[in-house]
Image: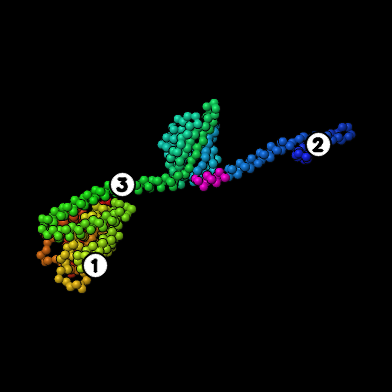
Amino acid sequence: MGIHKSSNRHIQKLRVIYQRLVVGDRNLWVAGIKDVTEDVRIKQKILDQNEELKILHDTLNDVENSNKFSVQYVDNEGRYYWSSSIYDILEREPRDDDEYNNIVMDACDDETVELIMSKVNRLGPNELLGNHEIEITTENGKTKYLLINIKNVHNSKGELVQKSCYARDITEEYLMRESLIKANEEKTILMKDSHHRIKNNLNLLLRFISLEEKFSDDYEEILNVTKKRISSFVVFHENLYKISNFKEMNISEYFDKFAKASESFYKHDYESFNLKFICYDDFKLSNDELVPLTLIINELVINTLKYAFAGFSKDYSKNIGLTATRKDDCAEFHYFDNGTGLASNFDSEKSTGLGWVIIRSLVSQLNGSYEVYSDNGMHFKIRFPLSD
């Protein structure tokens, strides 16, 4: 029975205990009174602390879950204690024997476990193994990356009391970082490749100019043709720097831009014409394939505009077409115009014209074959194997 005794200063709590005694034929009641004020106060304090601890525990779990981290410690009897958020990180349910297993190390491969444990065993009193990244595999086969910190906790006597561990899920950060590293490496490779490619293209232009000088002494014409060849390189490099994959390009997008650029560039020297590209099978070509192919098409356009429409009226609709098809492991391109066509005795293999000398050399560079013929204009078909 509890009794509250009030004074001017404070409230006391008393505990009264009654005991009945039988003496002969009489019943006697004995009462004992004890001041339990301090006991009650301590009990209430413990209850309040437990409630605070529960709130703190719930708050910690909320923080852990929102930040994808978990805390663990191992007592001196080898039992593991993880905060509940570890199960969200590992994507599995708790088990009865978890306190006897290092469930994070269980998710690592043997090499990682051996490396971590060797470092932990070398830790001195209260030393920290900090910010170590590990790869784990969840039970459903998903790969994740954790950042862990491990510390051996010793008492004042130097005895190991427990091991504490902090683990944070850094999968998103890790993959983003790896993606940035890969992108930076690709940019570096692109810069080196670009410098090499520009050097090769400039050397190629010098070879073309040298050949032009052997075939003609009209330096104004040489300069004019050289400008047109440079324009094809400009189209290639502009497209190269706008794509995410620097090793290959989508031909549909590339030749659409090539067609528009060619119409814009050549209109200053020739009457208006239409250049249309049709892609029947959309596929990609490597840079090593696109450069010679672009130069071949460019030489054909120059040849068409110089010779194919001579003698036609200004009202004549001058059309140039290019189609692309993929057959098995080969690419086929068909170039054609609606001009005068080729002379009846024309033989492209024997032609000494510079344009055809260049075309034959570039077709050979692609390990390809070609045919050229007249049918309401000039037709040129090239076929070459696609690189792996």
Q: Which mark is residue 18?
A: 2
x%, y% of residue 74?
A: 53, 35
Q: Dividing the picture into quarters, in which one does residue 59 lie?
A: top right
Distance from the alpha carbon under mark 3 to that under mark 1: 39 Å
Q: Name the residue under label 3.
A: 188
Mark 2 neighbour density, 10 Å: few (under 14) some (14–19) many (20 or more)? few
Q: What stretch is highlighted in magenta?
A: 59-68
Distance from the alpha carbon under mark 1 to that under mark 2: 115 Å
User: Is 189 covered by the magenta stretch?
Assistant: no
x%, y% of residue 300?
A: 19, 61
- Earlier sequence position, callout 3 versus callout 1: 3
- Residue at position x 28%, y 59% from top? 254
Could you tell me which secondary element the residue under label 3 belongs to? helix
The amino acid type, in three-letter code, at marker 2 is: Tyr
Q: Mark 1 points at which residue?
A: 274
The amino acid type, in three-letter code, at marker 3 is: Thr
- Earlier sequence position, callout 2 versus callout 3: 2
Q: Is the stretch drawn in magenta largely helix, strand or loop?
A: helix
Mark 3 neighbour density, 10 Å: few (under 14) some (14–19) many (20 or more)? few
Residue 64 shows in this picture: yes
Distance from the alpha carbon under mark 2 to that under mark 3: 91 Å
**Side (left or right) of 276 relative to 137:** left
Compared with 153, 95 (above or below) is: below
State which mark lies toward you, 2 or 3.
Answer: 3
